[in-house]
Image (tube, rainbow, N blue to C red):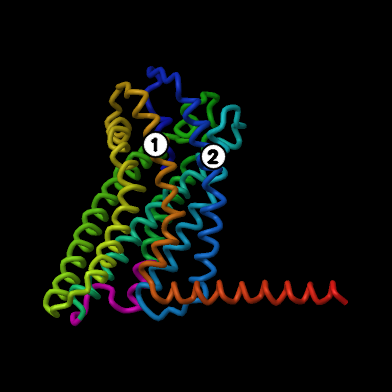
Amino acid sequence: MQNNSSHLSTSCTLSNAEITQILVAYLFFFSFPFAFLLNAIAAWVSFHLPLSSTFIVYLKTLVGADLLMTLTIPSIAASMLPGAALEVRSFSCRYAGVIFFTSMYTSITLMGLISLDRFFKIVRPLGKGFGQNITTSIVLSSLVWVVLFGGTAIPTIVLTDQTPGNATDDVCMSMKGPAGKTLHKYVVTSMEMLFWLVTIMIVFCYICITLKVLQSFRNSGSKNNQGKKKTKLRVFSILIVYFVCFVPLHLLRIPFTIHETFALNFCTREGLLVAHQVSVWVSSTNACLDPFLYIHLCREYREKLDEIVKDSVLFVKLHFCKKQRESNQ
């Protein structure tokens, strides 16, 4: 589940590959503090939320996946720099890169479950939809983690056990034996299929949700144009974040998947490689954007965040007043 840009045919000459890697590495380093801060706050807020609904269950697990993905960013960025030690590159190949992509697909799958949960609550509020109780949502979210990490991440880590080669372009694949390379092909293909299935489900769910909400406005004779705009903005913001972060990467992964699965020897254009490397960074920015979506999607999260911010401000003011009084004495 490593970055597939290193698996192109060695016959391809890419003069700007090193420059691109440096730029992408700095983009990773630049985004890491923001992603870590936002997800640390999101983790703190979600930790204080009771399991009062299925959405809260999915939100808590989604925050965990985003935070775990964020923690792998420094190692991945360091391995992309020219002259990075072979140990750093091999650690990224065996551990950080695998956890990064597995966490990303965990987030994608959980976003699909959140969309399905909202679909049943809004479009079919009187029916007993799939997973519309807290116990089932806990089982489903746990199953996502077990299947993805147990079925892809752990086997990939175990089978990436060869001594890394000295070549600078395919360290990750040189660390895999025949079984590891075969597993890699199946994992890349299955994750690509998983993404597009979840994407279709998310688009379908949010289109139905939007139509249902707008229909309820029309049936009630409401002229609440502001409410309609808020509904559309909320839905489209989710879809825009999802598509901007994940679709470019998976469109660009298709030729790499074909190359790896069928062992086709072809040279892609340099621009495709550059776009692929940048798209990996763009997908990581989802960890920065998700905390803002939580505010739009969850009233309990919004209220708890507001409460924590007010308590923090009050604490700072009291501490400042205490220090000021001590200095005046």
Is residue 194 left or right of 49 when viewed as pictured? left
**Residue under the point 30% across and 49% down:** 243
Residue 234, by quadrant, is bottom left
Give the mark nearest the N terminus, 2 or 1. Answer: 2
Q: What's the residue type where badge 1 is placed?
A: Lys
**Stretch of the chain drawn in magenta:** 126-141
* Rendering quarter of residue 62: bottom left
At x 34%, y 41%, the residue is 249
Dot 1 falls on a residue whose secondary structure is: helix
Q: Could you say where residue 121 lies in the image, as x and y percent from the top left?
A: 25, 75
Placement of 322 over or under 291, stated as above or below: below
In-front residue for pair 122/9: 122
Badge nearest the viewer, 2 or 1: 2
Q: How many marks?
A: 2
Residue 263 locus on image (x, y percent): 30, 28
Q: Position of residue 161 (x, y in %)?
A: 51, 39
Decide if residue 141 is on the left or right side of residue 123: right
Mark 1 lies on residue: 181
Which label belongs to residue 77? 2
Residue furthest to the right: 329
Residue situated in front as seen by the camera: 130 or 184: 130
Q: Amino acid at mark 2?
A: Ala
Cα gap from disc 2 to disc 1, whole angstroms: 24 Å
Q: Which mark is residue 205?
A: none
Q: Mark 2: give few (<14), some (14-19) or many (20+) Cα within 10 Å.
A: many
Residue 325 image point, x, y percent: 81, 77
Q: Is residue 94 magenta?
A: no
Instruction: Residue at 45%, 61% (x, y): give it.
Output: 291
